[in-house]
Image (cartoon, helix red, strand yellow):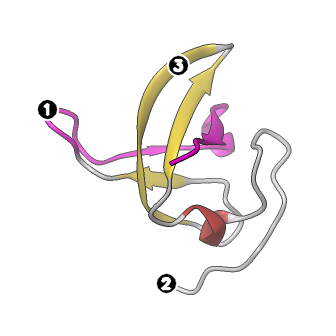
Amino acid sequence: MRLVQASTPMSTFSGGSSLLGKKVEIQHRGKVLRVGYVESATPSGEVVWLEASGIKQRAMYGPAFGRKVIPLPH
């Protein structure tokens, strides 16, 4: 998958490729839904896939689903 930079109004990052491997927080209406690491993303950054962790399966989130994706510090 080729990833390119793009801005997304519901996120605090610019494009999917800038988040690969990064820890992020997924929010909806100000509530934290999940925290995890980005496994892959669309070029626009509208959809990101968080890797499976513990009992939580790999899942899609992002502005395309009305969710904010917020990068977290290491």
Which residue is located at x 43 percent, y 33 percent? 35
Amino acid at circle 2: Met
Which residue is located at x 28 percent, y 48 percent? 58
Q: State which mark lies toward you, 3 or 2.
A: 3
Which residue is located at x 67 percent, y 60 percent? 45
Compared with 6, 64 (above or below) is above
Question: Which is nearer the N-term, disc 1 or disc 3?
Answer: 3
The residue beneath circle 2 is 1
Q: Is residue 72 magenta?
A: yes
The residue beneath circle 3 is 32
**Magenta-highlighted residues:** 53-74
Amino acid at circle 1: Ile
The residue beneath circle 1 is 55
- Side of 26 where 16 appears, left or right: right
Compared with 55, 39 (above or below) is below
Compared with 25, 51 (above or below) is below
